[in-house]
Image (cartoon, rainbow, N blue to C red):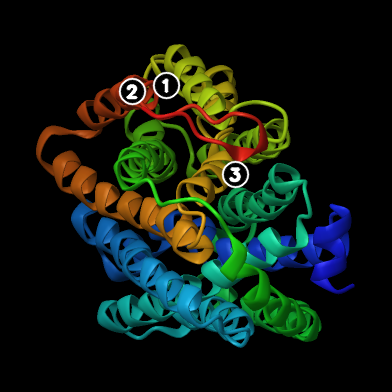
Amino acid sequence: MAVQAVREKGRINRDAVWSISGSHFLNDLSTTGLVPALTQLYKSVFHLNYTEISLIVLVSYITSSVAQPLFGAWADRSPKAWMLPLGLFLSTLGITLTGIAPSYGVLLLMVAISGLGSGAFHPEASRVAHLAAGRAKGLAQAIFQVGGNGGQAIGPLIVSLVILSAGMHSILWMFVGVALGLVLTLRLYPWYKEALRDYAKVRRTIEGENRIGAVVLLVVVIVLRSWCQIGIAQFMPFYYAHKFGMSYQLSDALMFMFLGAGALGTFIGGALADRMPKQRILLLSMLLSIPFAFGLPFLHGAWAAVALLPFGFFILSSFAVTVIYMQMLLPRNVSLASGLTIGFGVGAGGIGATFFGVLADHVGLTSVLYILMALPIVGAILSAFLPVDGKGGSLARA
């Protein structure tokens, strides 16, 4: 079970990888899965406008965004195994307590606690996947990220099938997730502490230099991708309701399909990352998503799935890939790489959701969707300027 043996023989530690994937599922269910979908309920309970509901998403994502790179940098200097269970506990507990929030201000506080927990959880969880991967970095990261994307996809479905009809207090059932999260992370805790002791020895032998210019460019591409994902999940249900009279239950089911396709794309893209250059996968994911992005504002009902499913698949097929790619660009800062890709990228998506919410209040949802349609084009152009990685993780000069 020791990580040293896993690394020397190149075998993946499947028990650790699947455990951390399950933990990731619960964390992202509590944050990016439930928070955007619950804004429909919060809107009616607290009588909010688009700007105010977007602020809920902003608070969730910005706390994770600001915290995650900071936690990651701290964890790179001195890894903290206890941040793994504590972070997941806070992220699940925070969203659970929104079910009894007496006011909009308290609601924002609980959402912020959940976001901070996610910020603490992700850097350590990503390191678990990295240490348990052996030589199968892409496959391990894919399994880890599919857990998170699965949580994102299930969130709207839970809201649609249960919470919208049962009301705010039904969110308290998430205490089951709090307990399950503690079981998973505390079960993994002894192995992770041992793995960190071994990692501290080999970290001093890691070769390679940080590529700051490429890191900045990759972060911009990740932010654009996050704006696409979160913008669609946040605003398409409202767009379908106002433009076509579609029920929130049906639109939430479509969002589940969209994010579920993204989870499938994440897994396949991550698995391919062990065989193909990661820069090429990122570029192709952007290019292939463009034609389906242009169908989003015009298709509705069952036909909406024709655009949403392939768009979700392609736009998120680079999700796990960019984490591994960032770790290659920052070889000595694995947790910081996770914070920049998973944390900052998703948090910036929350900022974008707030900006688009304000824009929607002034110019309408249709204009916002037209902007979202153009983002994959910009992402593809920028991806073409990133260095191409070769065999053995080497990177060509841009």
Residue designated by label 2: 373
State how many labels appear: 3
User: Which x, y percent locates residue 338?
Assistant: 50, 58
Q: Look at the image and tell me in which quarter the N terminus lies.
A: bottom right
Q: Earlier in the sequence, mark 3 or mark 2?
A: 3
The three-letter code of the residue at mark 1 reads: Leu
**Residue occupying the point 59% across, 74% down:** 170
Q: What separation in Å lies between label 3 and label 2 (alpha carbons)?
A: 22 Å
Q: Is residue 268 visible?
A: yes
**Residue occupying the point 87% across, 66% down:** 5
The numbered dot on residue 320 is 3
**Residue occupying the point 41% across, 68% down:** 68
> Which of 161/115 is in front?
115
Disc nearest the viewer among 1 and 3: 3
Q: Look at the image and tell me in which quarter the C terminus lies.
A: top left
Q: Tell me the quarter of the picture where residue 189 sits.
A: bottom right
Residue designated by label 1: 296
Q: What separation in Å lies between label 1 and label 2 (alpha carbons)?
A: 8 Å
The three-letter code of the residue at mark 2 reads: Met
Q: Secondary structure at mark 2?
A: helix
Disc nearest the viewer among 3 and 2: 3
> Contact, CB < 8 Å: mark 1 with mark 2?
yes
